[in-house]
């Protein structure tokens, strides 16, 4: 550091400055450490301000050198007590910085103002969210392992955590709206195209929730008051497990960043649960026109008509859709069109930037729908026939054809084994392969295959399926959307599948070890927050690193205690280096004082 005399119109201005190397711009630069004032004014306080502050600059330089080095004595005979753990994670500080930018602490101050509580809902939300991302486990494990983090999270009990779960659940919808609005200062949020999909999470319990109901079959609590149905019900679990499950519907924006989620019982169809979350987002987030993208499981007549109406007229102001369309499950006219030919071949780039052939064709078609509508004075819905204008795209993929063939051959192999050894299988283990077996039946009580039936391979079905290997179809309300854009928009749906993978694999969000709907709501709220933070971090890092790699690096960015107030960092990689540049903080120092780490973590 040195004293600099700066000539200004008002006179000579004194400042202490230092030189440093700007890693981002790759050049040496100068910064002001301390502004002192004009020389003439300083003469009133000092006999010789230049000499005084020149010496002061030298002293600051020596002090800085002293603080950057420390002599410590290491006792090679010192021992550790059982339970010693002097390693702490600091990687969570990156997620905490985004958490602060979302102002979630202010949200909880607002929601808990005036409530007398011994615990901080904000601190518990942080602990549950950061642990879900970097050190997942049960609520008891999370509390007992809170020393994983450098920051102390030991001022709450397990009972406090469960009380906080109730508060989190009561405010989950408002919290989703809050973080959506606050996230817009971190990155651009674009609802114009939104992705929706559902998945499920299983519980490690043997029995599903049993609801008490009134005379009309509606759930009631122990006092006879209306209540929500229990979440934990048996349904089609993604991995074909027999355990009770809860269903989640997740809505993402155009850039793949989560917007909102809902939960519903595991035995209910996902087809009707897209509408409530869309209504909530449209009513509370932004009432702009949205094109919703979903897979073929949500491609129903009711959903099409509910979103887009009959799609007549030049400018339809209602929301739009892009859905996957089953080719094998389509009507005869559509299948005939698929196999007819007349395809166009174009060169396009795949997700890896490689040139591939896009073999496709499309048409605008008057699609006939049979939708459920309500009539005044009638409890039951009635069917109504409507005709909507729809653009239909079909394209062929050699890669997809090979995958379909391989998947079918695996199922046929299992079907042949089932025919030879039916006692090895039941309704659950025969799922998929049983569809290729003629005359198969299952006992309604035991789920076992009924004996005495002549089981044969369904050759006719296999031949019919082979015709459509490699063909994929997408339909949309956007009649002017190009074929390539339709394909590109629909392929974005893969990002939501990746989000489910993150929650299930890296967050270990299943099996769920909670019982009440409120606690389950709160559990997935913290999972949602953790996912949002990771996606925002991916955006801050310009999409260069995937979630798994980011989380792995943050988990490893640890320090270990060297001395009473001195810590040594043990890991550094390009992801941490990218975080350092993106957030403008120094993360590559090997040794740091405790107060410096506390300043870094802002507590």
Image (cartoon, helix red, strand yellow):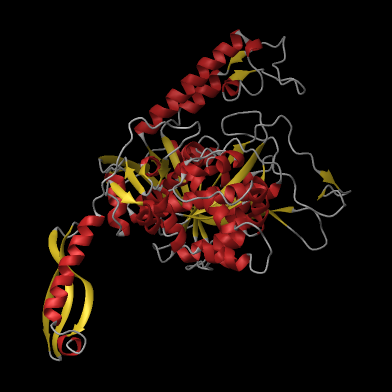
Residue at 44 percent of width and 32 percent of height: 80
Given residues 395 and 298, the one toward you in this image is 298
Q: How many marks?
A: 0
Between 296 and 573, the one nearer to me in the picture = 573
Q: Is residue 395 left or right of residue 35?
A: right
The image shows residue 511, relative to residue 291, as above or below, that is above
Q: Position of residue 484 (x, y in %)?
A: 35, 50
- In which quadrant will I find the N terminus? bottom left
Note whether residue 497 is visible. no
Q: Name the foreground residue: 228 vs 557.
A: 557
Which residue occupies the extreme right position in the image? 215
| Residue at point 47%, 46% (across, down) | 496
Q: Position of residue 535 (x, y in %)?
A: 42, 51
> Residue 159 appears at what percent x and percent y?
68, 47
Q: Is residue 162 above or below residue 79?
A: below
Could you say which quadrant of the image residue 205 lies in?
A: top right
Q: Depth check: 19 or 194 in front?
A: 19
Picture quadrant where residue 20 is located: bottom left
Q: Place residue 580 in its image quadrant.
A: bottom left
Confirm whether residue 122 shows in the render. Answer: yes
Residue 504 vertical position relative to residue 537 in the rendered view, above or below: above
Q: Can you name the residue that lies furthest to the bottom here?
A: 10
- Indicate left or right for 523 with 375 as reference: left
Image quarter (top left, top right, bottom left or bottom right) of the C terminus: bottom left
Q: Position of residue 60 (x, y in %)?
A: 20, 66
């Amino acid at each position: 550091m040195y004293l600099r005399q700066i000539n200004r119109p008002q006179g000579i201005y004194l400042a202490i400055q230092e030189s440093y190397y700007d890693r981002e711009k790759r050049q040496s630069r100068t910064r002001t450490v301390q502004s002192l004032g004009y020389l003439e004014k300083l003469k009133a306080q000092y006999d010789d301000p230049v000499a005084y502050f020149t010496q002061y600059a030298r002293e600051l330089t020596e002090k800085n050198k002293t603080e950057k080095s420390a002599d410590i004595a290491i006792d090679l005979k010192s021992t550790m007590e059982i339970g010693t753990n002097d390693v702490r994670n600091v990687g969570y500080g990156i997620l905490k910085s985004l958490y602060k930018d979302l102002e979630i602490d202010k949200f909880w101050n607002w929601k808990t103002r005036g409530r007398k509580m011994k615990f901080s809902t904000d601190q518990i939300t942080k602990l549950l969210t950061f642990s879900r991302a970097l050190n997942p486990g049960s609520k008891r494990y999370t509390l007992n392992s809170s020393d994983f983090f450098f920051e102390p999270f030991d001022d709450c009990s397990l009972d406090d955590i469960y009380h906080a779960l109730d508060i989190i659940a009561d405010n989950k919808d408002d919290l989703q709206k809050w973080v959506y609005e606050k996230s817009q200062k971190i990155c651009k949020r674009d609802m114009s195209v939104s992705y929706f999909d559902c998945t499920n999470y299983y519980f490690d319990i043997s029995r599903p929730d049993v609801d008490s109901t009134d005379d009309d079959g509606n759930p009631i609590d122990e006092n006879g008051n209306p209540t929500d149905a229990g979440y934990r019900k048996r349904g089609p679990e993604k991995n074909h497990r027999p355990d009770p499950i809860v269903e989640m519907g997740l809505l993402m924006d155009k850039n793949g960043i989560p917007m909102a989620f809902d939960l519903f019982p595991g035995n209910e169809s996902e087809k009707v649960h897209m509408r409530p979350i869309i209504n909530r987002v449209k009513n509370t987030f932004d009432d702009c026109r949205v094109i919703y993208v979903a897979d073929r499981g949500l491609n129903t007549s009711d959903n099409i008509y509910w979103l887009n109406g009959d799609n007549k007229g030049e400018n339809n102001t209602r929301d739009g859709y892009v859905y996957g369309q089953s080719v094998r499950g389509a009507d005869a006219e559509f299948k005939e069109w698929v196999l007819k030919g007349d395809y166009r071949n174009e060169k396009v780039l795949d997700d890896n930037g490689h040139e591939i052939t896009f073999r496709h064709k499309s048409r605008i078609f008057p699609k006939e729908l049979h939708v459920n509508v309500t009539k005044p004075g009638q409890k039951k819905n009635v069917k109504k026939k409507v005709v909507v204008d729809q653009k239909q795209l079909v394209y062929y993929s050699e890669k997809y054809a090979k995958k379909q063939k391989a998947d079918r051959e695996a199922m046929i192999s299992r079907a042949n084994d089932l025919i030879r050894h039916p006692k090895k299988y039941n309704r659950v283990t025969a799922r998929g392969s049983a569809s290729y077996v003629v005359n198969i039946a299952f006992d309604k009580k035991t789920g076992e295959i009924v004996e005495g039936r002549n089981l044969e391979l369904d050759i006719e079905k296999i031949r019919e399926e082979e015709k459509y290997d490699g063909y994929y179809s997408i339909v949309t309300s956007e009649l002017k959307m190009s074929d390539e854009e339709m394909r590109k928009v629909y392929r974005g749906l893969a990002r939501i599948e990746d989000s489910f993978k993150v929650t299930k694999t890296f967050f270990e969000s299943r099996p769920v070890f909670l019982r009440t709907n409120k606690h389950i709501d709160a559990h997935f709220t913290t999972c949602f927050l953790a996912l949002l933070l990771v996606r925002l971090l991916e955006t801050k890092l310009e999409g260069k690193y995937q979630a798994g790699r980011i989380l792995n690096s943050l988990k490893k960015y640890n320090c270990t205690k060297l001395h009473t107030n001195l810590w040594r960092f043990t890991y550094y990689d390009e992801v941490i280096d990218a975080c350092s540049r993106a957030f403008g903080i120094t993360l590559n120092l090997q040794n740091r004082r405790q107060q410096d780490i506390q300043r870094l973590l802002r507590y």
